[in-house]
Amino acid sequence: MSEEVRTSIHGQWSNRMVFILAATGSAVGLGNIWKFPYIAGENGGGAFVIVYLICIAVIGVPIMMAEVMLGRRGRQSPINTMSALAAEEGRPASWALLGWLGVAAGFLILSYYSVIAGWALSYVFRTASGVFEGATADGVSSIFTNFISNPESLLAWHTIFMVATMIIVSRGVKNGIERAVSYLMPTLFVLLIILIFYSMSTGYFFEGLDFLFTPDFSKLTASSVLVAMGHAFFTLSLGMGAIMVYGSYLPKETSIAKSSMMIAVADTLVALLAGMVIFPIAFANNLEPGAGPGLIFQTLPIAFGQMEAGVLIGTLFFVLLVFAAWSSSISLIEPAVAWLVENKGISRVAASVWCGFATWLVGIGSVLSFNLWAKKTWSLSLFGETLFENKTFFDTLDGLTANIMLPMGGLFIAIFAGWLMKSESSKKELNTKEKGYNLWLLLVRVVAPIAVMVVFLNVIGVIK
Ligand code: PHE
């Protein structure tokens, strides 16, 4: 096929801005606002945050460029893109497995992502009802604990969120995804800024900043480095084909380097802002920064209960969080849906229904992790090193996908784009200045793969 006629059967973004918005919509989600603060809290703050930022810059951005580039060149679902590009570059057809790894990761991530998005959705109504007005930290915590101990209600919210996701996915790229994100992301940003003013007023703002930005490297363990690196992939939606599939809808002329950097900067800003909002509130109310997945649900409502117009601002905040989660969840399942449409000749609607149903089923395991299965735990050791210990179904799934599958996917993407693709091909596709191209090549060939491998080997105790 000549390059000029190569376009995706699923459509194309209207322009570059729309791609940036959609990819930012994919990147900015629960990862930034819900996950980043709680894992930063669990892993001791500052030093963890620095490792995370380094990973974004030297692994995340170059791999994002690689992923967008592969997607735009292949113009199909990640599985078919990888087989097409492998054929084009004279590489084994088994590279399609990389696409499969991504589909599996996206599917598993969405299963628990939807459960947490369901929490956020229920908090829209809880906040709007005014229950948090004047509530104490203890009151807010017990509302949360009661809520997650009820499997039926978690299941109901998970179901609603999953249906909402499938509705957008089934409408397709242009009609669904494009419109949803254009207004929501900027509004979310503004709300976070408003919340920063509240957190400044708690009197613990600098404690929060100190926790977030002053590194104490003695707190850094091999596993927290792995979590930081895994989160860099998770938060940028990398390593599983989401960004690749969005790249496949990208018009030819767009600069991949500039777009990737803009997406990474926006995503990082949102996470840091969220941290700057959450930690001062936590410290002001004597809450543990390492409280785990409930952290934002136990801190933010306190703020909403105390601030002027808190019911309104709080409700709006959770609405936006749900939208941020929504624009991420559609990209988690898009690779699978696109593949079904391409290979099985079924409609987008049917593909969405099947994928949604299967994901929903697996999600029930995460629903139960917070109540009936809270004591059912898993451990994993490799070469005699414990990778994780006594983790619930939810934690296991999260650890396996974010910290292992995504970095693994990213590693192979880097190897393919950096070493196995002819540099004429990647140069033409990236179309940047010589210097920029060489820097990218260095990062994607050497720095990123070595970094990922070193972290992996360190965790399994092969290197110390
Ligand atoms: N980046 C999203 C978030 O931070 C999650 C996600 C991961 C989306 C992988 C797509 C692919 O919430």
Image: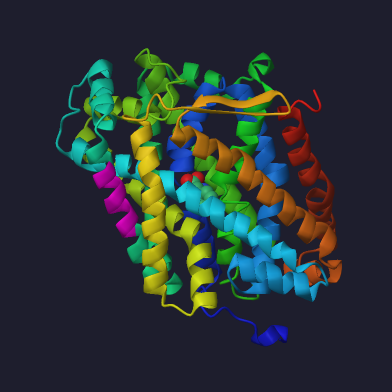
Residue 361: x, y in percent? 37, 50
Q: Is residue 358 left or right of residue 453?
A: left
Query: From the viewer's perspective, is residue 201 above or below residue 72?
Result: above
How far across and how far down the image is residue 67, in percent?
Answer: 66, 60
Residue 132 vs residue 431: left or right?
left
The one nearer the camera, 90 or 204, is 90
Q: Main secondary structure of the magenta part?
A: helix
The one of 334 and 375 positioned closer to us in this rendering = 375
Q: Position of residue 243 (x, y in %)?
A: 58, 59
Apparent side of residue 336 relative to residue 58 in the rendered image (left or right) = left
Of residue 100 and residue 46, the one placed in the foreground of this image is 100
Dividing the image into 4 quarters, which one contains the C terminus?
A: top right
Instruction: Give the residues in magenta.
Output: 155-164
Question: Does the image show residue 87?
Answer: yes
Assign the N terminus to one quadrant of the image: bottom right
The residue at 42%/16% (across/down) is 288
Q: Quadrant of residue 210?
A: top right
Q: Is residue 153 left or right of residue 216?
A: left
Determine which quarter of the picture holds residue 224: top right
